[in-house]
Amino acid sequence: IYQFSPRSIVSDACVSYQTLETLNAKVKPVVDELTKETDFFSYYRLNLFNKKCPFWNDENGMCGNIACAVNTIDNEDDIPKIWRASELGKLEGPSAKHPGKKTQREKPQRPLQGLLGENVSENCVVEYDDECDERDYCVPEDETTSSKGDYVSLVRNPERFTGFAGEGAKMVWDAIYRENCFQKSSFPQSASLGTSSLLQGPAAQDFRNVLHSAERQQIYAQHHQDPSTSFAQTGLENEDECLEKRVFYRVISGMHSSISTHLCWDFLNQTTGEWQPNLKCYTERLLTHPERISNLYFNYALLTRAVAKLGPYLQSYTFCTGEPDQDAATKAKVLAVTQASSSVPQIFDESLMFKNGEGPSLKEDFRNRFRNVSRIMDCVGCDKCRLWGKLQTSGYGTALKVLFETDNDSGEVPALQRTELVALFNTYARLSSSVEAHHQFRAMAEAAKREH
Ligand code: FAD
């Protein structure tokens, strides 16, 4: 059961579990400090309640547990002054309008001199994130909805066990994994794709070689023991897929693993009423499924690469809450994270993806499918799970945008909204605590084994 070897290589990323755990010992303290102790990164704004599930009637799947509830910030006095609607109104005038994609692209960081002083950029005060551009892996908000959503304190609404389960949860996970079937698109704009491997020649062979053979054997064994296990769930069907399709699957499975890790780590013991780690939960959901753990570590490598790549861009980013001292401290904390994440070079090579002739159409399909996954999040019938589901899909979407939409010649990163940055760094913090929890669960499992 516990065939976890820290020296094994995480397939599709050129790095071992051990290297990632060593890296995480540096990353975790700084990313925790950033996401827990700065206003900029601990408040998230999203449309949590007023978007309907676009795929099915979700009324029956609603979670009635108190643990599913989210406390939104109803009193604007609780958020930094500069983000309040009255302040935005002042800056944009009484009939403030969405500036539209064109204006946003022309002046993504134009300083509002005279109004806010030097070194304060527009991205501080006006959140334009209600509209997608074609390079986004996120969901376009309904432009007819004027609501800008709610502010939520992520610190006061931690991701943990909620009791959300059963048919409602199953429908959502099934719908998410269906997006992985690249041939049978449920997304009308998706291109129809062939099955042939995207990577040809030596590059393709390299990637097959890094698939860890022990992991493959275990997946086969699992399938033979229980043939009802679908290949979609084991990840096996992806083994002979091209890199891009495999990466898509790994991102969603790794996200699922991370969510499962947190709910098992911060689990409510319904007998004692205490919140504590639940080893049985972790053993059943993760420890006995090494490919799920591999996907979790793969996501950690992917996000590490995206955060490291953002480092130079963030050097000149203004983290604006209206308090210059606080903003400088936030920037120092962000740069501590990007620096820590840069300490392992060659962690994931995004330049190998979307390369050959089929590349552009495959990329569009990949992006559309990922947008669809984020749309499915509106079907999650538990507010707390929906909050973290939306935040994490947006965090992965931002990472994918940074990795695949950066202009490799000029090094220019696409402009990022505050919410995208908040989602990215909080998703990184979630993965970081999953990696740490996995480490601790492993020790608990070994101790339990010795006792028997
Ligand atoms: P599930 O986790 O629902 O899994 C369904 C099936 O998917 C499994 O039977 C297995 O075959 C397959 N599977 C499981 N894990 C993986 C993986 N990593 N990779 C590939 N296949 C896999 N509950 C909470 O308590 N707190 C939360 O914060 C929370 N957030 C959620 C967010 C979202 C977006 C969703 C959809 C659900 C969330 N849930 C949360 C519910 C939770 O994820 C489970 O659905 C629930 O605990 C029921 O678990 P289960 O054992 O039935 O299997």
Image (tube, helix red, strand yellow):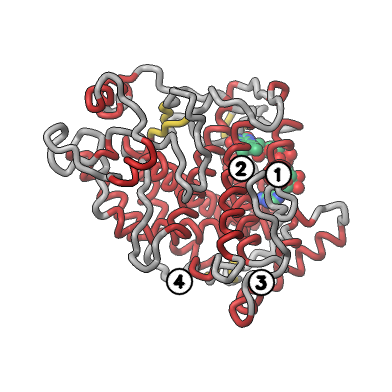
CB-based contact (under 8 Å), mark 1 and mark 3: no
Give amino acid for label 2: Asn
CB-based contact (under 8 Å), mark 2 and mark 1: yes
Lower sequence index among marks 1 and 3:
1
Q: Residues within 10 Å of mark 2 (few under 14, many from 20)?
A: some
In the rendered image, the quadrant that contains the N terminus is bottom right
* Residue 346, label in figure: 4
Using the rendered image of the protein, determine whether residue 23 is visible from the camera's viewpoint: yes
Residue closest to the eye, 325 or 370: 370
Give amino acid for label 1: Ser
Lower sequence index among marks 2 and 4:
4
CB-based contact (under 8 Å), mark 2 and mark 4: no
| Residue 446 pos. (x, y %) | 65, 58
Between marks 2 and 3, how big is the CA–CA gap? 30 Å
Frontmost of labels 2 and 3 is 2
| Residue 98 pos. (x, y %) | 36, 30
Between marks 4 and 1, how big is the CA–CA gap? 35 Å
**Which residue is labeled 3 in the image?**
212
Instruction: Find numbered disc 3 in the image and state the secondary structure of the residue it sits on.
Output: loop
Between marks 2 and 1, how big is the CA–CA gap? 9 Å
**Which residue is labeled 1 in the image?**
186
Frontmost of labels 4 and 1 is 1
Query: Relative to 337, is 278 above or below?
Result: above
Ligand number 1: quarter of image: top right
Residue closest to the eye, 175 or 30: 175
Query: Relative to 63, is 440 above or below?
Result: below
User: Going 51% across and 57% down the picture, which residue do you hit?
Assistant: 300
| Displayed quadrant of residue 49 | top right
User: Going 35% across and 54% down the picture, which residue do you hit?
Assistant: 337
Instruction: Find numbered disc 4 in the image and state the secondary structure of the residue it sits on.
Output: loop
| Displayed quadrant of residue 354 | bottom right
